[in-house]
Image (spheres, rainbow, N blue to C red):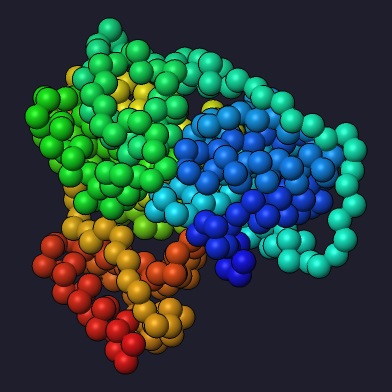
Amino acid sequence: MAGIFKSYDVRGVYPESVNRTTAEKIGRAYAELTQAGTVAVGRDMRLSSEELFDGLTAGLVSSGVRVLSVGCCSTPVLYHAVGTLKTDGGIMITASHNPGQWNGFKFCLADAVPMGSDNGLKEMEEIFNRDSAFFPRSGGGLEEVDILDRYGAFVRQFADLKGRTFRIAVDFGNGMGSVELSGIRDLFELIPLYEEPDGSFPNHEANPLKTDTLHDLCRKVKETGADFGVALDGDADRCGFVDETGSIIPMDFFIALAAGDILKKGPAVILHDLRSSKAVPESIAEKGGKPVMTRVGHSFIKKVMRETGAAFGGELSGHYYFRENFCAESPALAFIRFANMLSQSGKKASELAAPLRRYASTGELNYEVSDIQSAIEKVRKQYSGTGKWFELDGVSGEYGSWRFNLRPSNTEPLLRLIVEADTAKKMTEEKNRLLSVIFENN
């Protein structure tokens, strides 16, 4: 069981570290910690999700919790259920983009406030690991609720397509994207790829941050003459865009594009994670907004969003947070906003993104090292004495013509690096220098 509690969720391989017994204990630990009366529970299409649902709800119900099951759904639908049904919390059974043998749980409190390591998840882990007798409580129960029509109506209200019908290629990645977009698909002519939910992920990993998973989508956009393409991850809380030429639009660029649309209504705070291109805060400021940098991770960003009153926020990984959806993700709403921008501007997708292609970036690179903290410490010693240095999330340095961030993954045993520079040559040079430090004697 060791190691399944991460910074902002629980994840592990089924059935070795995550199974029905684990799920039941997690249900009891969540109930004890939160003292919730009602909890919304959703699950993705993974082969083990139904078994984990049975265990989780058994633990909750035996602890006196009234469980509202929203069925097989996307994570944003679960968050919307928590907010609109006014439950005391919610749990989504998913391992997001991880391979099919993985599964896990994402937790939130009332109003879809996420539970992470800084607001309850560590305490929940302590309860989970505690060896003490369990005493059932009465009053619990399980009932099914239908939230999809309500979520679809919520997203549709933001559509402003000016009478245009867009042809859009969508790579569902055999995940929950078909549910996420179910309420708005009739507004568009969709060209689907891998739409059938399949927890074995037979075609490719459902992770649009990995550019190799987007090859089929890029090809489909070009073959069909689609206006743009969209790819969703496994639990459909992230998405990435491809322009009409089949070129990938970096996912942090959407932060700046959506900010430009939002800022037409007046000044606002817009959040971006520290991995985002320098072009993102520059563009937000140019359009009259106040860019605020955050660390990586949905629980951290949503907290800052509430503290600052931000109108919108996003991450390089394709998480986009909307104040209108309880500060939670909604790829369906991102989908609508992107189409709105095209219809209102009269531009092509490539033309919208072009002004943001100011710098050369490696994208986020992942490395396995024998000692993550030792590698970070070597970089700290080598680089912290010059430039602008900060440690908001891992270690980051800015040196005029280039910048980098190096951090441990919050969900996997990996070291993540991103380097950006004014030129591709400079980016490659500095990346290679950093790697030589990271892998020295490692």
Quadrant of the drawing holding the C terminus: bottom left
Residue at image location 66% in from the left, 56% down from the top? 22
Residue 392, given in percent of the width and then of the height, sits at 49, 65
- Residue 30 % position (x, y): 74, 50
Asked whether residue 227 is in view, the answer is yes
Can you see residue 356?
no
Q: Is residue 118 left or right of residue 61?
A: left
Above or below, comparing residue 394 to residue 267 in the picture = below
Q: Please give left or right for residue 50 compared with residue 390 in the image.
A: right
Residue sitting at x 28%, y 52%: 210
Q: Looking at this view, is 34 or 18 the one in front? A: 18
Q: Eyeballing the image, is 157 above or below 227?
A: above
- Identified at 64% across, 36% down, the residue is 41
Looking at the image, which residue is at 57% across and 40% down? 50
Is residue 104 shown left or right of residue 372? right
Across the whole image, how many numbered discs are drawn on residues?
A: 0
Of 142 and 309, which appears nearest the observer?
Answer: 142
In this view, the residue farthest toward the top is 163
Quadrant of the frame with the N terminus: bottom right
x and y, in percent, of residue 245 in the image? 11, 34
Relative to residue 42, is residue 432 depicted above or below? below
- Percent from the top left, x then y, of residue 58? 74, 42
